[in-house]
Amino acid sequence: MKNKNFSKIAQIIIENKFFFIPYLIFLVISTAFIIYYGHKNSFIILNQINCPFLDAFFYISTNIGNGIFILIAVVILIFIRLRLSIYLILAYLTSGATVQIIKNTTKCPRPKAFFTNGEIIHYIQGVEIYQTNSFPSGHTASAFALFLTLTLATKNNFLKLVFFICALLVSYSRVYLAQHFPIDILVGSFLGIVFTLLVFIIIENKYKSNVLDHSLNYLITHAKRKK
């Protein structure tokens, strides 16, 4: 069974290489960047790349990773394909629970609490800045869970790449908004992907019913016809 699951994961990665290859590149470059510049300087370098347009862009786009947006996406997916909504809600809940456990265990300071020696940090007016439970990033885990779920739902390679870029932008927004360190988003992205893949494998193995491949409105209409 383990070999079968590993083969399935390998197949998923191959079929979605336009998402996973860029992610692997991101993983390698980010890890090297953090190791080379260190925990502190890697944040400062990324946080200082800013302008008014990016302020507005990331102020809005970061909300894609919050729970309300994910729940809205789940509701929308119910009316497209039930299986997708199940993937997303379970991936969100499992990765989110894991993130919260790690956060409350490590209790790492966020950038605002970490930098106390007068370092210049770019903040955006109107954004509430948190000070504790930095590691890992929950927004990032949620964003990668969402966009990987959408990636698994399409065969369009261009869209797969677009979905990766969207997840990456949400992740970067957390550093841009001074909410997280680069290591936080790196681990958050990994958790989002791992739990989405686990949910996908479990559901595919145990719930192969075609019912899940329909939308809720289709099932309601079909049930009415049977009456």
Image (cartoon, rainbow, N blue to C red):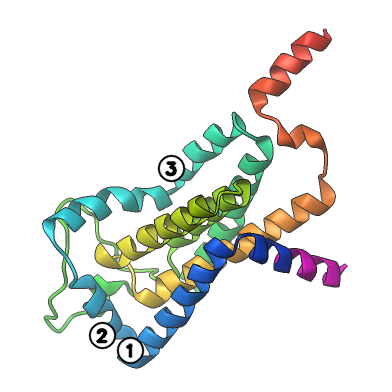
- Classed neighbour count for the residue bearing mark 2: other residues with Cα under 10 Å, few (<14), some (14–19), many (≥20): some
Q: What residue type is labelled 2?
A: Asn
At which x and y percent is residue 70?
Answer: 48, 44
At which x and y percent is residue 128?
Answer: 24, 55
Q: Distance between the residues labelled 1 and 3?
A: 33 Å
For label 2, the SS is helix
Most common SS among magenta residues: helix
Q: What residue type is labelled 3?
A: Phe
In reply to whether residue 183 is colored magenta, the answer given is no
Within the image, what quadrant is residue 36 found in?
bottom left
Q: Which of marks 1 and 3 is nearer the N terminus?
A: 1
Mark 2 vs 1: CB contact within 8 A: yes
In percent of the image, x 52 and y 74: which residue is there? Answer: 24
Q: Quadrant of the N terminus?
A: bottom right
Q: What residue type is labelled 1?
A: Gly
- In the rendered structure, the answer to whether residue 137 lies left or right of residue 148 reads left
Pick whichever, 178 or 37, lies toward us.
37
Q: Where is mark 2, residue-wise?
A: 41
- Classed neighbour count for the residue bearing mark 3: other residues with Cα under 10 Å, few (<14), some (14–19), many (≥20): some
Q: Distance between the residues labelled 2 and 1?
A: 6 Å
Residue range of the region highlighted in magenta in the rendering: 1-9
For label 3, the SS is helix
Q: In the drawing, what numbered circle is on residue 69?
A: 3
Q: Which of marks 2 and 3 is nearer the N terminus?
A: 2
For label 1, the SS is helix
In percent of the image, x 65 and y 65: which residue is there? Answer: 13
Q: Where is mark 1, residue-wise?
A: 38
Pick whichever, 6 or 139, lies toward us.
6
Q: In the drawing, what numbered circle is on residue 118?
A: none
- Judge whether 215 appears above or below 49 on screen: above
At which x and y percent is residue 140?
Answer: 44, 61
